[in-house]
Amino acid sequence: MLAVVLGLSLAFGVPYFFSLLGFAAWAFFGHLITLDDDMPGEWSNLEKSKDIWRISQVELGVKFVVLVSVFLLVAVFPSLKEFGAN
C-alpha cells in the first residue's frame, strides 16, 4: 500500500490525502457491498454464527469511522491536501 501511495505521488503528483481517502473508501464500500455474505447461513458464514455477523458489523463501523475521520482531518487541516503533490 505504501508503495502505491508513493508511486502515485511521484509519478502523477497525487497528494497522499487522496490515496489515503481512496484506500479508506475502497475498504468501506467493499465491505458494505459484501456485508450480506456475513449474515448467518450465507456464503461467508455457513455455520450460522451470530458472532461472525456482529463482528462484521463492528468492522464496517470502524471502517466508516476511519473514512469520516480522513474527511474531517482534511477539513480541519486543509494544508494536508498538498503533501505528496509535485
Image (cartoon, rainbow, N blue to C red):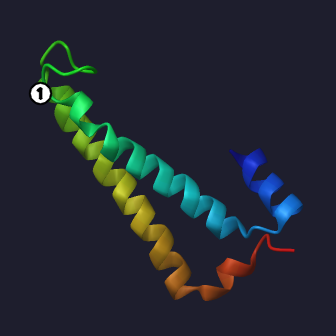
Q: Which image quarter: residue 22?
A: bottom right
Quarter of the image where the N terminus is located: top right
Tell me the residue at 36%/61% (across/down): 65
Q: Is residue 3 left or right of residue 42?
A: right
Q: Establish if 28 lies above or below 18.
A: above
Q: Position of residue 67 (x, y in %)?
A: 43, 62
Question: Which residue is at the front of the view, 41 or 70?
Answer: 41
Q: Establish if 69 lies above or below 77.
A: above
Q: Amino acid at mark 1?
A: Lys
Tell me the residue at 25%/29% (across/down): 37
Q: Is residue 23 left or right of residue 43?
A: right
Q: Position of residue 26 (x, y in %)?
A: 49, 50
- Give the SS element for disc 1: helix
Q: Which image quarter: residue 38?
A: top left
Tell me the residue at 87%/74% (across/down): 86
Q: Which image quarter: residue 84?
A: bottom right
Per the image, the residue denoted by label 1 is: 50
Question: Which residue is at the front of the view, 62 or 43?
Answer: 43
Q: Establish if 20 lies above or below 69.
A: above
